[in-house]
Amino acid sequence: MRQDATPPSLAAAFRDAFSAHPAGVAIVTASGPDGPAGLTASSVISVSAEPPVLAVSISRGTESGAALLAGETLAVHLLTTGNRRLAELFARPGSHRFGSDMDWYTAPSGEPIIRGVGTVLRCKSLDRMPAGTGVVLAALVLQVLDGGSFAPPLVYQRRIYYALDEWSALRART
């Protein structure tokens, strides 16, 4: 085993730990050299409110990931339960994305924007940090757009999508 490699048991335990940890679901898009590119991500985090900065982990080994990392701008679409099929489409390698049957447009600044999601964050790439098999991309939020969907947020845990709604809330004891 290489000295810098993670022992298989640790890697499996790490995957299991994060599989059990629920995460919000997003689609990240950018204009690539071969047209619009995008992927599903459950690794989007808020980093700073002043200025507004977010980060997302992107795999280097995919065509979509390479396009997102090469771009100067990107759009982060925060998904709702109405977007489950979109999340599945953008997560499937080799799937046909941005077809005529999908409601999307190109922003004046070049990012592909998908309609009918919760919120869209138009961003400018700030920094890229290699991390294992991925790259952590930090981005400055330039604009927050209403995506048109008011359905509950889409959450992902143990390879299953869930709705996060008012019934999910744990109420404080009074």
Image (cartoon, helix red, strand yellow):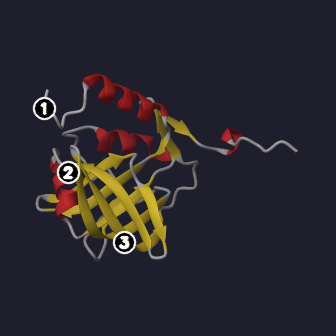
- Three-letter amino acid code of the residue under disc 1: Arg
Gap in Å between the C-alphas at discs 2 and 3? Answer: 20 Å
Q: Nearer the viewer, residue 161 or 3?
A: 3
Image point 50% across, 44% down: which residue?
A: 154
Disc 3 target residue: 140
Label 2 or label 3, whichever comes before in sequence order:
2
Classify 10 Å Cα crowding around label 3: few (below 14), some (14-19), many (20 and above).
Answer: many
Image point 13% across, 32% down: which residue?
A: 2
Residues marked 2 and 3 touching at CB (< 8 Å): no
- Three-letter amino acid code of the residue under disc 2: Ser
Q: Percent position (x, y) of residue 14?
A: 37, 32
Residues marked 1 and 2 touching at CB (< 8 Å): no
Label 1 or label 2, whichever comes before in sequence order:
1
Q: Secondary structure at mark 1?
A: loop
Q: Secondary structure at mark 3?
A: strand
Residue 64's label in the rendered image is 2
Q: Does 172 sit above or below residue 47?
A: above
Gap in Å between the C-alphas at discs 1 and 2? Answer: 29 Å
Q: Residue furthest front?
A: 3
Q: Quadrant of the N terminus?
A: top left
